[in-house]
Each structure stands twice: as C-alpha cells, then as structure tokens.
Image: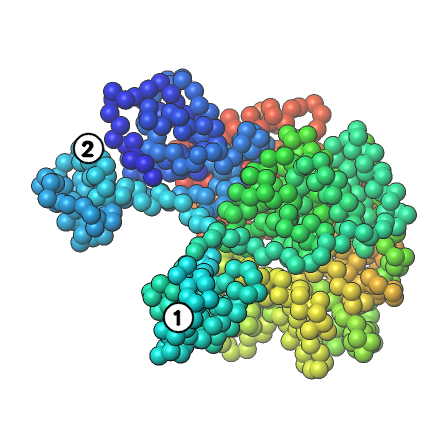
C-alpha cells in the first residue's frame, strides 16, 4: 500500500473530489478530497480508504469523481486507492441505488450485502513495526525512538495510543516520516481479506536435468534412503507429465514431509507457486446431444418468440416436465452470443444437483455463488464474473448482486419460492423482482420457471405483461402421481394410526423399500418436539429473549429458540411447580426419524433439514447419499420440496398437512398448494406412477382437493378473487413497518404515534399498529403497521416519500429515542 495520504500537505491539495459509498447504514452520502498523487488512480467503482469520524477508517466505493467541493463541510482527504480497476461498474451502482430506493434502505446496506466479506476491509486505524532487518534506527529522533520502542513491546498501537505516549495531538507528521522510511505500517488492518489460493509445485533443479546429473544425485543420497525414494518417485511422476505437488511425492514414495523439506534445503527441488482456482473443474465429457420432446420443442420456440417482444417469460411447467433441458438450450444460445447467464435458485440445497447437471454441458464456464462458500471462494467468483472468465453463475439470491459485464439471460428457477426474499438484515430485497430490474439495465431477458407459479407472476402473465409458456406433460410420458388423502381423525377411530403414522403410510413405506424404491417423508418443522410442557401445572419452556416456546433437539439434548439462537439444557424439573412430570409435545423431523426407527429398525433413514446440513457441503452430502441409495427414507422440511430429482423415489408421505394450511397469512393457501404439489412432484419420475399420501385432519379442505386434482388454475382463481376483494397483491402493494423497543409500553406508544403521523397523509391506507404472531424477539417488543397501497390513483414513489417524511418527524421527537423502525417493502 502506498504511503497513506493522511499526512498530505496543504500545498498538494487539488480540486478533485470523490463521492463515495460507505459500508454503513447511513442516509447521507459523503464527499472526500483526492490528493494530487492519487488523481490518476481514482476512478468509478474502485475502493478508496477514507477516514470517517475521528478514528474509524473504511474502504468505500467511488461512485462519482467531480471537481465540485461539498458546500457544508470541508472534505477530508482519501488515504489511499485499493484497486487499479473498479470492482463494480456503472450498472451495479445503478442497481444498488434502485435497491436502496425501492426497498427503502441505505446505499451502505446494499454495499454490505453485495460485496463478499473478503473484499471489505477492517475498520481500525493501527500501526505496527515493518520488517526492519536492513533499517538503521540510529538516525531517529527521541520521539520516533519512543514510538518504535512502544511497538517493540506492544506489537501494534492505535493512533490514539501514540497520541497518549507522546503527549501531543500532532503525531501524523512523525508517523508519516516513519512510514516513508519503512519503519512502520499504517492501518495494516485495512487490507485485503481476499488472498488467491496458491498451490506449490516441485521441479528438479537444473543441476540434475540430464541423466548424468540424476545418477550423481541418487548416488549422493545413498545414506539418506528416504530422500532417495522421494527423488525416485519424483522421477517416475515426471514421466507421467503434469505438475507435481508435495502430496504427490509423499503418496508415491511413502516418505514424510520432512524428507522433501530436506531435499528443498539441499537445492534438489525447486519450489514454484501458482495461483489456482478454489473450485474443482470437471472431468465429465460434455453431453450436448439430447433431443427435445415435441412439447419441449414447442415451449422452446414459444419462449424465443416471446423474447422478441417481451423481456420476461413465465414457464409454467409441471414437475418433471423437462424444464432444465429448456434452460440448457437457452443458456447455450446466450453463450453463443457472447453473453453471461445468471441461474438463480431459491435454496443452497439445490445448487449441488443443478450444478452437476449444468456442468455436463458447460464445464468450467460455470461458477457457483452462495453464502455457504467461504470469503475467499466468493471473492474469487466475484473477480471471475467481473473479468468475464465465468460465463454462467448458479447461485442463491445474493448472486443477483454480482458484477456482470455482459449479462444476457437470467433464469429464475422455482420463481414462486419465498426464500428469494431477504428478511434480515437490510436490504430486504426479493431476488426475483430485483433480477427483473437488473436484466432491464443490461437489455437481458428473464425466464421465470415454476410448476406452481406465484399468484403475482401468473397474474402478470395472464395480463400480458409477461409471456406465458406452458408445459403440461411430464417428460417421457411419466404420469403425474396419484395422491391419497388420509383423514387422521377417522383413521384413529379405526385404530389405523401408529403414533404419527397411518398404517396406510407405513405399509406404503414397507412396500416401496421391498421394491428397492425410496421414500420421502415431509414434516415442515425441524427439531424433535416444538415444546416441553409440565403435565402438572401446564408450564411451557419459553425463550428468555423471545415470546416463543423452546424447541427440543434430541441430537444436542438442548432446548433451542429458532428465532434468536438461545439454548439451554433440557430441564428435568418444572421451574414453576417443581414437578418432574414433563412431556415433549408435538413432533419435528428428529422425532419422526426416531419413531420410524423404532417401528422399522432395518430402515436406512436420512434427514434433510437445517440441523443436519451444517457447513458448506452439508446439503450436498445428504443429497448425494440419498441419490446413491445409502438411505431408504429421507425425512425433511421444505428443503425436500425444492426441485430435487431422485430417480428411485416412488412414495411421498406428508405427515401433517394442516400446519401449512392453517398458518395465519394471506398467502397460506397458495403456499400450501405450492409446497404440497412440489413435494408430490418428487415421486414417480421414471417408469411407474408415483404415490403421495397426505395425512390431515381436514380432508375436504379446498386446497387439498386442488392438490389431488393437480388443479393450479382452480387455486389461482380462488386466490385472485379473494385478493381483489380484500386488497392484497397483486392489486395492492404492501409495506410493513415494524416498531421495536425493549420496553413494551414505549413500543406500543411509539407505534401509535408513527401510525398517526402516517395517517395524516396516507389516511385509510394505514392499518394498525398490532402485535405480530411473535411479539418479542431478542428482547425487542414489536408492533406492526401495515400499509395497503392501491396500484392506481397514487404513485408508490409519492407514498415512499410520505413514509420517509413521517419517519423523519418521528425520529426528531426525543420521546421516540431508542425506538427502531424497520421498513419492509413487499413483505412476503
């Protein structure tokens, strides 16, 4: 890093300024002055080191270079420029501004979400000693000696520490002198966290390149047989070609690492370092010669026809209809035109299977991007997208924020999924909707794919805003599954229930396994049991920070809060009455697994939920094991519903359908239909018709009848009629404001004040405040205000401006100090 311009003299000041984006949740933008020495380095999209406040230092993104000085304050100098070229471009910065504006957050929030952690920088101003082997301290003055002696003792110092040590505030000239002479490093914590992955390879010293040299070498090692074996192994590996690593030599010779180190010290091996990708390549031969079925070909042609006149096309294809093959052909077309492609998936769990498939066709042009990868891996993908090396990105919602150069196509698979929506922290964006805006800025096309499209997307398609293409047949003439409803109450009366399983389901599992088939059981609640209750007094173990019961997890023998992460040991005695009669109530995936193991001890059972898939490759391991038939039964939460394809699965069991149907949300019926249909779609993918068994207390519920009939249009018609009547999307927009405070009364009082402020301009559009289902999380009480805004008659831009004005007045009232207000646009 060049000398920090923290010490720039007034004579060197020039008239060049930069407006920057700071990685902070602040409303204002800030302008900094550029030292003359850095004028040539400053450009749009580069990171610059800036001081913010007295001691904080950040890496900020330059979004504008100008000669206009700020009017209300004297601009500080930037301290350094990190990048030679911008790491974001004009289109990314425009996209960031749109997200901040549309979702009512700050630009710094978007920057924090967009940049991989490895491309951000630490924020403490510190100094430490540099490598001083060739430096002579004798020429330093007393104060400089004092600073260096303090560094020798402490290792590193904050600039504030130096001020105290010297007893003076003007320490920057002294530190600049020490820096220029090479004695210290300033702001060393302001450094790249990203380091390229370097692999070490070995070559034989040129002294031993000919046969005579090799003979003399081996003779010289007669008294070091282990080293001699290492050299012989190296020579054999050399004949095979390719680069040779330390591990290669160790495996081929059986020697230890110390023998190889000794050979390096003797000058036998030369060591060379090479920057390599963190992502494994593929040795799979590309297979591009599949043939469309007639319905697929028709759908492909229709998509391309719609793309001539529309930017967005909705592909409504039933499960197993061959949507992925359509995606492949469309991606090939985009690549042939020199464009990049973004393939969005709602769940990290899906990336393993879809990446495996797409690698068959596209090899190492494809990269993967999601939060389970470490910082360095995500930074590497960032740079490869930026320089155009990666042509296809498969990723979860955050992949929409990558710095594409020539984006031509975005595929949003399973577009109906709620997990495309970010809830915490800001920006609370929806990746599908953001992708549509992003594509427009590149003049790219968007393909939305789903077997059960969201009501909004299907409405837009029916209204002509999007193109609509339908694939109503399964590929290869595979039949849709037969769905059977089990009335739990009636089965219980007939003694046909065994704990949580109907005998029909148990027999189905037994028959499927006997036929070497596999089974998926769906229970949309993780953990062992939802709550622990005292049978004597009714006490329920609750979280100390949230208004929710604690879930018992048998694997850890702990009670966990799924909202804040709090956990405690499972209690043996009721804290309210002292009784030892405690009972686990309800059932999650762990308990379903436990009960099934007791009933069928020979079954090989796997579990797919958040608890069983920790770590970067946790999802992949479970999915691969099931795909390889290491399990007979896979028990899972909604993860099992999302586009996974297992060839041997022929039975699906839904343990409890009622929890989804009865959830108090205007989308509950749509989501229940979607989830049940998606789970059902995992069965019967090959020669035989699949079977789905749904257990419920409400067998005549309209959603279940629609699922049995595979009648998406009936579900859509019901939903769209009700939403129009009750003012819900797509006819009205929703904006939710959550008011939070640690004092319950103050929370309610402040929420009422804010609601009244909003009503002065937005009138009857303002609903609430009211308590949400969970009224306290992480010790913050919550009151919710909801705005329903019609799509005609008032501009949403105007509405947001009125909300901002109300929030400003609210914040100026000192009585509301300490109250947090979280704004969520499109909170679903």
The residue that appears at 74% across and 32% down in the rendered structure is: 311
The residue lying furthest to the front in this view is 212
Q: Are marks 1 and 2 in contact (CB under 8 Å)?
A: no
Check the image and report above or below for 524 versus 16: below
Residue where numbered disc 2 is placed: 173
Using a 10 Å C-alpha cutoff, classify the residue at mark 2 as few (fewer than 14 neighbours), some (14 to 19) or many (20 or more).
Answer: few
Q: Quadrant of the N terminus?
A: top left
Distance of mark 1 from mark 2, alpha carbons? 60 Å
Q: Quadrant of the C terminus?
A: top right
Q: Is residue 729 above or below residue 482?
A: above
Q: Residue, x 19% and y 33% (percent of image)? A: 173
Q: Residue at x 36, y 73 (%)?
A: 220
| Residue 654 in sight from this viewpoint | no
- From the top left corner, tell me how far across and down residue 680 is, in percent: 79, 60
Q: Is residue 487 left or right of residue 104?
A: right
Q: Is residue 712 left or right of residue 264?
A: right
Residue 389 in the image: state x and y as whole percent.
59, 43
* Nearer to me, 536 or 689: 689
User: Considering the numbered disc 2 on the image, is that residue within a helix, a strand or a loop?
Assistant: helix
Tag of residue 216? 1
**225 or 728: nearer the eye?**
225
Q: Residue at x 49, y 59 (%)?
A: 565
Q: Nearer the viewer, mark 1 or mark 2?
A: 1
Q: Residues within 10 Å of mark 1 (few under 14, many from 20)?
A: few
Could you say whether the residue bearing mark 1 is in a helix, strand or loop? helix
Question: Height in image: 471 above or below 580?
Answer: above
């Amino acid at each position: 890093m060049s000398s920090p311009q923290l010490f720039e003299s007034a004579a060197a000041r020039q008239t060049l300024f930069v407006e920057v984006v700071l990685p902070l949740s602040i409303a204002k933008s800030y302008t900094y002055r550029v030292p003359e020495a850095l004028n040539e380095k400053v450009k749009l999209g580069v990171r610059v080191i800036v001081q913010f406040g007295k001691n904080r230092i950040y890496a900020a993104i330059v979004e504008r270079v100008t000669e206009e000085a700020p009017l209300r304050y004297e601009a500080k100098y930037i301290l350094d420029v990190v990048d030679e070229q911008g790491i974001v471009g004009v289109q990314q910065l425009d996209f960031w501004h749109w997200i901040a504006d549309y979702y009512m957050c700050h630009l710094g929030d978007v920057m924090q979400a967009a940049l991989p952690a490895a491309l951000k920088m630490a924020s403490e101003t510190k100094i430490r000693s540099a490598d001083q082997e060739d430096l002579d301290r004798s020429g330093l003055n007393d104060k400089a000696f004092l600073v260096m002696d303090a560094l020798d003792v402490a290792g590193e110092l904050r600039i504030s520490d130096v001020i105290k040590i010297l007893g003076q505030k003007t320490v920057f000239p002294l530190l600049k002198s020490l820096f220029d002479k090479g004695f210290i490093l300033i702001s060393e914590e302001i450094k790249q966290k990203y380091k390229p992955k370097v692999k070490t390879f070995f070559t034989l010293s040129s002294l031993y390149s000919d046969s005579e040299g090799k003979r003399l070498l081996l003779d010289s090692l007669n008294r070091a047989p282990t080293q001699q074996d290492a050299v012989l192994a190296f020579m054999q590996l050399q004949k095979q070609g390719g680069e040779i690593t330390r591990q290669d030599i160790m495996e081929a010779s059986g020697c230890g690492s110390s023998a190889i180190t000794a050979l390096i010290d003797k000058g036998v091996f030369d060591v060379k370092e090479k920057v390599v990708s963190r992502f494994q390549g593929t040795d799979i031969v590309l297979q591009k010669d599949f043939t469309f079925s007639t319905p697929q070909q028709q759908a492909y042609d229709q998509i391309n026809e719609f793309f001539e006149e529309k930017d967005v096309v909705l592909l409504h294809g039933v499960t197993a209809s061959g949507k992925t093959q359509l995606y492949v052909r469309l991606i090939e077309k985009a690549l042939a035109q020199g464009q990049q492609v973004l393939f969005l998936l709602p769940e990290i769990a899906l990336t393993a299977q879809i990446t495996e498939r797409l690698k068959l066709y596209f090899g190492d042009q494809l990269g993967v991007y999601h939060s389970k990868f470490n910082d360095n891996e995500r930074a590497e993908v960032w740079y490869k997208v930026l320089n155009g090396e990666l042509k296809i990105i498969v990723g979860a919602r955050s992949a929409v924020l990558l710095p594409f150069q020539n984006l031509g196509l975005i595929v949003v698979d399973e577009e109906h999924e709620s997990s495309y929506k970010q809830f915490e922290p800001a920006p609370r964006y929806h990746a599908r909707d953001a992708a549509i805006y992003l594509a427009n800025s590149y003049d790219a096309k968007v393909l939305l794919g789903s077997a059960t499209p969201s009501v909004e997307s299907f409405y837009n398609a029916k209204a002509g805003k999007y193109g609509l293409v339908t694939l109503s047949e399964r590929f290869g003439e595979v039949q849709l599954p037969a769905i059977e409803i089990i009335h739990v109450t009636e089965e219980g009366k007939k003694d046909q229930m065994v704990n949580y399983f109907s005998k029909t389901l148990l027999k189905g599992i037994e028959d499927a396994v006997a036929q070497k088939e596999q089974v998926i059981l769906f229970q949309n609640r993780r953990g062992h049991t939802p709550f622990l209750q005292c049978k004597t007094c009714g006490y329920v173990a609750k979280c100390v920070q949230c208004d929710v019961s604690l879930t018992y997890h048998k694997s850890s023998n702990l009670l966990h809060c799924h909202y804040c992460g709090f956990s405690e040991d499972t209690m043996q005695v009721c804290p309210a009455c002292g009784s030892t009669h405690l009972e686990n109530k309800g059932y999650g995936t762990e308990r379903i697994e436990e009960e099934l193991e007791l009933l069928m001890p020979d079954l090989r059972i796997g579990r797919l939920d958040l608890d069983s898939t920790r770590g970067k490759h946790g999802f992949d391991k479970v999915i691969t094991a099931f795909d390889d038939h290491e399990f007979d039964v896979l028990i899972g939460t909604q993860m099992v519903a999302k586009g996974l394809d297992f060839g041997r699965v022929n039975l699906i069991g839904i343990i409890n359908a009622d929890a989804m149907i009865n959830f108090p949300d205007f989308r509950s019926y749509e989501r229940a239909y979607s989830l049940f249909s998606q789970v059902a779609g995992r069965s019967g993918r090959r020669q035989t018709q699949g079977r789905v068994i749904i257990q419920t207390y409400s067998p005549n519920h309209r959603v279940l009848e629609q699922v049995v009939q595979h009648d998406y249009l009936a579900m859509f018609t019901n939903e769209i009629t009700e939403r129009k009547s009750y003012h819900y999307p797509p006819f009205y927009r929703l904006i939710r404001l959550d008011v939070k405070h640690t004092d319950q009364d103050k929370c309610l009082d402040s929420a009422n004040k804010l609601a009244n402020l909003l009503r002065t301009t937005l009138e009857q559009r303002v609903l609430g405040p009211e308590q949400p289902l969970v009224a306290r999380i992480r010790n913050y009480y919550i009151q919710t205000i909801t705005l329903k805004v019609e799509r005609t008659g008032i501009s949403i831009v105007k509405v947001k401006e009125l909300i901002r004005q109300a929030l400003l007045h609210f914040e100026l009232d000192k009585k509301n100090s300490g109250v947090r207000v979280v704004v969520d646009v499109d909170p679903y």
